[in-house]
Amino acid sequence: MQADPVTRETFWTIGPVGKAAFYYLAAVAIAVFLYGTYARFARYAEGADDRFDRLDDLPGRVLRAARIVASNRGQFDRDLYAGVMHAFIVWGFLTLLIGTTILGIDLDLWRPVAGSSFFVGDFYLSYSFVMDAMGLLFVVGVGMAIYRRYTERDGRLWGKHTSLEDDAFVWTLLALGVGGYALEAFRIVGSAEFVAYEQVSFVGFFLAGVFAEAGVTAGMAETLYFFTWWSHALLAFGFIALIPYAKPFHMISSFANVVTRDEKAGVRLPGVPADAAPDEIGYASVDDISWRHILDQDACTKCGRCSSVCPANASGRPLDPRDVILDLKSYRESLDAGRTEEVEIVADGGESVVAAETMESCMSCMACMDACPVDIEHVPEFTQMNRRLTETGQMDEMVQDAMMNVFQNGNTFGDPARKRPDWAEDLEFEVPDAREEDVEFLWYVGEYPSYDERNRRVARSLATLFERAGVSYGILHEDEQHDGNDVRRVGEEGLFEMLVEDNVEAFGSATFETVVTTDPHSMNTFRNEYPEVSEFDDPVFHYTEVVESLVEEGRLGLDGTELDYTATYHDPCHLGRMNDVYEAPRELIRATGVDLREMPRNRSDSFCCGGGGGGLWMDIEEETKPSEERLREALQDTSAGDAVERFVVACPMCGTMYEDGRKTGEFEDDIEVVDIAELLCEALTAKDGVAVDTPTGADSGASSAAD
């Protein structure tokens, strides 16, 4: 007598009629899913075309996206618990999906063609073990999500757009996972004897033992299996059919978002077509929203990571990045559903989808984009709305004044261009003119080191370092104009293009090898945006990158023992998060002998000073200034010993904001703000008396273009 094969019956207790009904419902569910998915992607095709020209090497993009999604890299960032949770859910779900597909291939393709089944023997045993193991991870992951959502009630998971859809999604996943094990247990009990090989299905086998101990007989198990099987199948079919119409669609849209991502998004803002009319600039209506930004909206999972890291949100400004994305999505979907009353996308007063003050609150720091696990491009989308405010004359008045100063004088202070090089007058040496002699480094000083008294000390310090190292450098004097980085981010695209033209012309008047900037904002726009809108393509570096190489070559003569106090370093958004310059500033600080302490939020997780995106020029009401919050963070992190004495920056804008934060937060007696260039000169002074000549009585506080 031949022994029963090592396998199981897929349609046990179902019968021919039930099997036919199953296939019919499966076909309907798949058809609804395919139609809904097609409709979604057809809607993207109706969006503005701003990215198709960037979708080169699509196979390579898909492979990179697969690696990113498979590794859960974005989920692990800043949150180990969420990373483990999501990894369990994703890999468990994919394994169950693949397992179901394999079973379908055996039933509907292999058996009819080959006349036999491969779902037997060792294959079946291996299949059963893997499915049980990965299914368990799936259930554990969903359980972790439920615990965090309903027991811990993590604040970032709840917000304006939280709905029953979110509850239905997570509980449906749990029901599908647990239901599969219940089916397995009822089948094992219903077989009237516990077959030894079924132990490979260790979770189902254990649950079967529990049911048997609870008094479930073989007949009861057979009946329960029938009803549980159909409940499980109908729930699965409903889930599949509703994927394109509800939150589960993020499983598709988020992957598509990662595939189509622009690695320079936010760092490099999209341009405006040369022939665009004023009413075509920015997002005036849903029709103006790019297909990529529609995809962004569909990819959002409401996880709140962007909200939790946004400095504007933390300081009490009226901006929650998640709400902006989902407000736009809700409005778009209401129009698609037949809404006839349209409102402005963004406006200052009156009814609009997004309020002007919300967009004005954005610091363009890209913390939201860095934290987003599905690569939503918040900053480019926000910029389009700022452009709309600019084109309709709804820009903040203080920003308007700053823009007018830039237009008339090339700087936000409104001072004459001829005063731009005045910062160098008190130096004991003459700063070379790059227009009159060939140089290795064309030094773009920037407006704050040129006009702001506090930051002029930074310019003099850097000039001293260049002289000390014997660097071939020069400046453009009055021909230097505002770099345009933040001009563009507040929505003034036309003025930005004018500045690009003027600065590129000024660069063309000099012979040099490399541009070096004092300000990371300047470095960012020269390096990433100027080449997009002009013929400028020279290498651009922040001064810390250049000076770090000088220190490494021994050209400054530092031996790392000059200063002996403690300090912390603040990563500027435009230097660190946007351009990945993290180590050069730290190496320079260590080269002075300073004991460098890291704040909890450092490198790509750095917390913005509040000055970006026009924040330096505005007077915004907020509960706590970002600069005060950051200084408080530096002072409270004393676990490694003595309190931090110096707060080191590498950005004039950051220096300005933190000097202001010292005053308003009453930290003037607790900590000193110092630029890296100043710190290096202090070390040189300690070593051999080399000093920077700072005029007596110079204002050590912050001043801004708004003053």
Image (cartoon, rainbow, N blue to C red):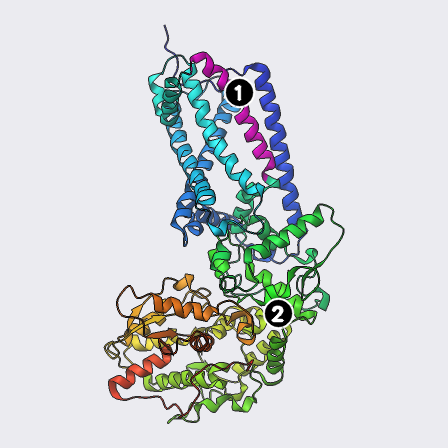
Query: Please, which residue is most extreme toward the top here?
Result: 1
Does the magenta stretch mainly form a helix, a strand or a loop? helix
- Residue that label 2 marks: 491
Q: Tell me the element at label 2.
A: loop
Quarter placement of the C terminus: bottom right
Q: Amino acid at mark 2?
A: Gly
Residue 328 percent across, percent down from the top left: 63, 54
Quarter placement of the N terminus: top left
Q: Is residue 426 above or below residue 446?
A: below
Q: Is residue 636 above or below residue 260?
A: below
- Residue that label 1 marks: 227
**Looking at the rendering, which quadrant does residue 32 occupy?**
top right
Mark 1 Cα within 10 Å, few/some/many (few <14, many 20+)?
Answer: some
| Left or right: 149 as drawn, with respect to 550 | right
Q: Is residue 257 above or below residue 399?
A: above
Q: Which residues are magenta?
A: 216-243
